Image (cartoon, rainbow, N blue to C red):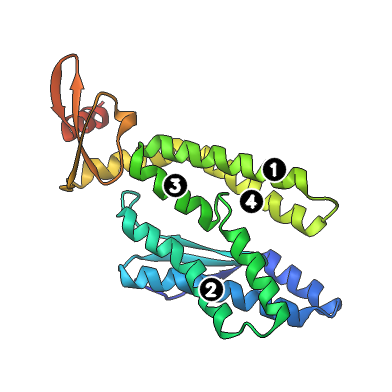
Amino acid sequence: MTTKNIFNIHPLFYLVAFICVITANFKNFIIFSSIIIVHEMGHIVGAFIFSWKIDKVILLPFGGITIFQENIDKSLKEEFIIAILGPLFQITFYLLYRDNQIFNYYNLIILLFNLLPIYPLDGSKIVNILFNEFISFKKSHILTIIISFFTLSIIILSIRHNILLYLILLFIFLKIIKEITKHNYYFNRFLLERYLFNNDYKKKKMINNIKKMKKQTKHIFKVNNKYYTEREIIRNLFDK
């Protein structure tokens, strides 16, 4: 894992910092930001443990996003540990400094918000990992997006006249839309990785359609009463 020049600060972060200065709320902004940084450090430590490469860490005024430079078909166990380490670091931070009421409030808000099953929050990553344990990669991604939209819609309908929260939800909405446009890209990249790297997975499964392929699983295809290896099917696909 490399940590050189990985930190990026989103323009909104500076904007909110400026607003907090002129409204005498800069102390609260520092507390809020420190919780976000500790949270992202959890993901960074997880990446260090499993030797994952970090592309960048983006600091936002309401959270952070850690982007990894890794293959899609990574160990689900590693993905889960890295995803959950963010909230765990945050809980540890709370246990160390829980005497401050403002700190406790912000910590709880960030923790609960981050665990919502909405992309790109940690909650959606955990949900996606659980889906991938039982169903195909393609269907897992689609269901994660559907749940993200459904949960986001409930929140939007529940809030009243909160401009800052509306801006946050708009940012998340645009992230979900972007994720939808990349669905086919992710699936093709998943297939390409399986084409390039002939990994010997412990799990075996028989399927009849390439869209049913699962992460961390080796497949045998049964098509028209004939059996084909996963590599034969994918090679035929990319040769075309």
Residue 36, relative to residue 165: is it above or below? below
Which sits earlier in the primary sequence, circle 3 or circle 2?
2
Q: Residue at x 48, y 70 (%)?
A: 88
Q: Whole-Å distance between the Cαs marked 4 and 2?
A: 24 Å
**Residue 75's mark?**
none
Q: Which residue is mark 3?
A: 128
Q: Is residue 153 left or right of residue 115?
A: right
Q: Which is nearer the eye, 218 or 157?
A: 157
Q: Whole-Å distance between the Cαs marked 3 and 4?
A: 17 Å
Q: Secondary structure at mark 3?
A: helix
Q: Which residue is mark 2?
A: 91
Which sits earlier in the primary sequence, circle 4 or circle 2?
2
Which sits earlier in the primary sequence, circle 3 or circle 4?
3
Residue 58, relative to residue 196: is it above or below? below
Which sits earlier in the primary sequence, circle 1 or circle 2?
2
Q: Residue at x 36, y 65 (%)?
A: 53
Q: Is residue 32 left or right of residue 38?
A: right
User: Where, by quadrant of the figure, is residue 78 drawn?
Assistant: bottom left
Q: Is residue 76 left or right of residue 18?
A: left
User: Where, by quadrant of the figure, is residue 105 drawn?
Assistant: bottom right
Amino acid at dot 2? Ile
**Residue 172's mark?**
4
